[in-house]
């Protein structure tokens, strides 16, 4: 075989990273070394894989075909290496995890240190996205999804669930007054999500007995943004317990209308493509998160 694995890795990394410079940083090589690898690869294949301009890199048709095959080869090598690690009972390799930024900040980040001590050969990569992503397109091994799952070809593992509460800062309640019932919310500043609209259905019953759906005075796409707004005294917010446990313990956020609140839990799942042959590093990660998240 004329082509080397290093050349395949450099080529794939340039595409994933978006530039030769970014790929060089990820692979801890020089820009010139990555450029030489691409040059050698194109010379060996006698095709142009990338069109280079001053502003961007673009795959040629031949480059797209070759990239798909290169990824299969790299994945096969990675799986072979992992099988050897399994024989040593020590999971290894890169694990790419995607989750909404609040879950990463409040759940995963506090677990990272302990996980790395337990599994030192797993290279953990955390990527945040507040939208549902395509795992293959984003080169993701496992994604954490919060809320009901839509029909999907992905396999899912439950990690737990969290209560929803309506909260506000003491400063806001001092200035605006504490609502006495659901009807009182009409005169308050309500903080809600831009999408999906279902997140603006709060765990309260309106006078007709249905879930209370708010019309937000201020919207944000991220739960973490809404949390910060609530802490700053911008209004009332409805958030999951995993985000606000420390805030409630300190008294920085307090629950509003607890007697009118109905129990609504957000399910939390991990989704992934591999099932019967679930790779060990994914299994170890999910076991670790589930064990430490459940008591919350």
Image (cartoon, grey):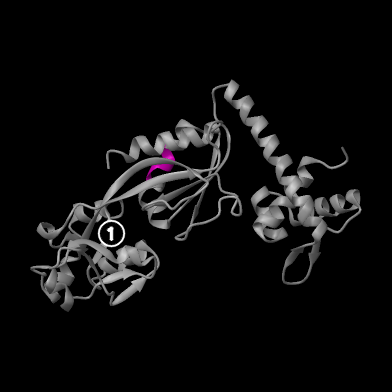
Going 65% across and 57% down the picture, which residue do you hit? 17
Q: Is residue 64 above or below residue 111?
A: below
Q: Residue placed farthest to the left in the image?
A: 180
> Which residue in the structure is indicated by mark 1?
239
Q: Residue placed farthest to the front in the image?
A: 208
Going 23% across and 72% down the picture, which residue do you hit? 235
Q: Is 149 positioned to the left or the right of 218 in the image?
A: right
Position in image of residue 265 (x %, y %): 27, 50
The part of the chain drawn in magenta is 110-114
Residue 111 colored magenta?
Answer: yes
Position in image of residue 198 (x %, y %): 33, 63
Magenta span: helix, strand or loop, mainly?
Answer: helix
Position in image of residue 244 (x %, y %): 27, 55
**Image quarter for residue 189?**
bottom left
Going 89% across and 50% down the picture, which residue do you hit? 45
Q: Is 29 positioned to the left or the right of 119 in the image?
A: right
Q: Is residue 188 above or below residue 167?
A: below
């Amino acid at each position: 075989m004329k082509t080397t694995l290093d050349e395949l890795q450099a080529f794939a990394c340039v595409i994933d990273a978006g530039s030769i410079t970014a790929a060089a940083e990820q692979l801890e090589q020089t820009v010139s070394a990555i450029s030489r690898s691409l040059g050698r690869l194109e010379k060996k294949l006698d095709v142009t894989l990338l069109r280079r301009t001053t502003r961007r890199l673009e795959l040629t048709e031949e480059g797209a075909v070759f990239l798909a095959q290169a990824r299969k080869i790299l994945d096969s090598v990675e799986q072979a290496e992992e099988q050897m690690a399994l024989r040593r009972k020590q999971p290894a390799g890169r694990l790419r995890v995607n989750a909404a930024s609040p879950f990463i900040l409040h759940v995963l980040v506090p677990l990272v240190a302990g996980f790395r001590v337990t599994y030192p050969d797993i290279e953990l990569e955390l990527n945040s996205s507040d939208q549902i992503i395509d795992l293959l397109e984003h080169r993701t091994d496992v994604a954490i999804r919060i809320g009901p799952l839509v029909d999907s070809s992905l396999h899912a593992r439950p990690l737990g669930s969290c209560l929803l509460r309506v909260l506000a800062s003491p400063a806001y309640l001092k200035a605006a007054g504490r609502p006495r019932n659901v009807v009182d919310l009409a005169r308050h500043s309500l903080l809600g999500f831009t999408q999906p609209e279902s997140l603006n259905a709060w765990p309260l019953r309106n006078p007709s007995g249905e879930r209370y759906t708010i019309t937000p005075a201020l919207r944000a796409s991220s739960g973490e943004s809404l949390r910060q707004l609530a802490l700053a005294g911008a209004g009332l917010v409805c958030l999951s317990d995993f985000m606000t446990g420390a805030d409630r313990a300190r008294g920085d956020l307090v629950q509003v209308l607890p007697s009118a609140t109905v129990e609504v839990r957000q399910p939390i799942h991990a989704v992934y493509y591999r099932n019967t042959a679930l790779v060990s590093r994914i299994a170890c990660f999910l076991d670790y998160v589930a064990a430490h998240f459940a008591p919350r």
